Amino acid sequence: MTDLTKKEKKSRFLPILIIGVFALFLVLPVIAKMIPKQNPNAGLEEKRALAEFPSLSEGDEFFTDLNTWFDDHIPFRLRLISAKKKITQKIEQVYRKKVHPFLSKLSTPDWYDSPEYSDRKTWDDPYLAPLEDNYAVYGRGDWLFYSGELCTPYFTGTNLLSEETEQDWLKKLGALQEYCEERGIRFLVAVAPNKEQVYPEYVPNYYIETADKRENRVERFLQENGISFRYLLNDLIEAKPLYECYMRQDTHWNNAGAYAAFHAIMGEFGIEVPKLQDVEVITTTMIGGDLSNFCGYSTRYPAYSIPYRKDVAILSDEKQTFSGNGAVEVIETASENPAHFVMVGDSFRDVILKFFIPEFSRVTSIHRDAIKEDAALQEIASLKKGDVLLLLAVERYDVGNPYAADCIIQGLK
């Protein structure tokens, strides 16, 4: 009889243990919330409110809502999410660096090595199939590229302008150039190349429709028709052996690339400045960028600082902001050059601006989103003989230059 009682106790122990552990697990969220360091909400930024504990009055929905609440308040939730993210990134990194290139080589398409395609390759390198994550394209050597805003068609040469559009751009840019010439204002339209145009060796292998791409044709057409236009691609390619000119995991150029463009633009205005190899460049490092924010993958890579002409004092710096990215910034300096410099452009103007500032006594930077604002038009209207007007757009926003030109002409009428 005694032996039977012991067996019964043993058989009951395991279910009781399981029930006890389950009950403890259920109350752990409440306990965890009372300990600040274990609060699953701490440091976790979410775009929604976490579920609240349900009321018994909800009837049949109570247990469904209780399950939702438990999911949101599970103990150590933040740490679990963080751990999952780190593990996922490690796995994805192995796949991108080891598995994906290997599979790409195995699946090389027939057209890639065909004689008909040999003259269309941008880089003689083993085939790497495109792999995209939220508009970020994984390239070789931890380089990321942007697939949004038609960047891929710009690279493959499939978005050439029609003759009608070319004539429209010529008309709008020509009207602004004529306005400047009548007043003795130096004028230039410039386009910063998309990153993949400068670094095709790191880009996955896309089928290139034509090597004579959109911006090459635009430059040739506008220059043949007398427009002061410069596609900065060759200037950036020339600077490549010295420094990386674009941030590996961002869509923008860095200080080295911006300075190379600055040197080329100043040459168009007849103003001599030191070449990139003749200025002080401090090598640093940075992590990630806008593209790494898109896909969640970041790594450390070279960055540069250029302390250009710190001898010229800034006397005043005033900035007005408008809707969207619209901004008008006016900077007065102690430069010996009395000329007024106005630059209209997109985000690519931000890094290059610092190099123009010490070269002119008044510098105005206008984001294209603010080009219709009175503050922007007044700055342009104040330009006189010897002053400078620059329209600068990154290649994927090249339509912004004729747009800005048309807005200026219409706004000044």
Image: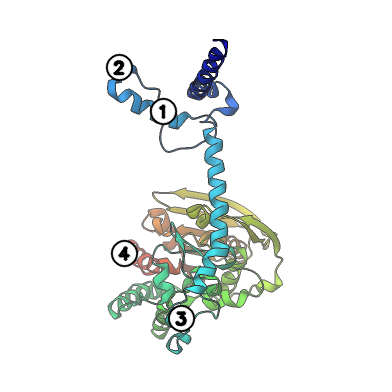
Query: Sequence-wise, which precedes: disc 3 or disc 1?
Result: 1
Q: Which mark is residue 327?
A: none
Look at 38% across and 65% down and name the residue there. 404
- Identify the residue under disc 1: 69
Is any atom of residue 100 visible in this view? yes
Q: Which amino acid does label 2 sit on?
A: Ser
Name the outermost residue toward the front: 1
Name the outermost residue toward the bottom: 115
Q: What residue type is labelled 4?
A: Gln
Q: Distance between the residues labelled 3 and 1?
A: 53 Å
Mark 2 vs mark 4, foreground winner is 2
Query: Sequence-wise, which precedes: disc 3 or disc 2?
Result: 2
Query: Sequence-wise, which precedes: disc 4 or disc 3?
Result: 3
Q: How far apart are marks 2 and 4 (CA)?
A: 65 Å
Is 168 displayed left or right of 104 in the figure?
left
Q: Which amino acid does label 1 sit on?
A: Trp
- Identify the residue under disc 4: 410
- Identify the residue under disc 3: 112
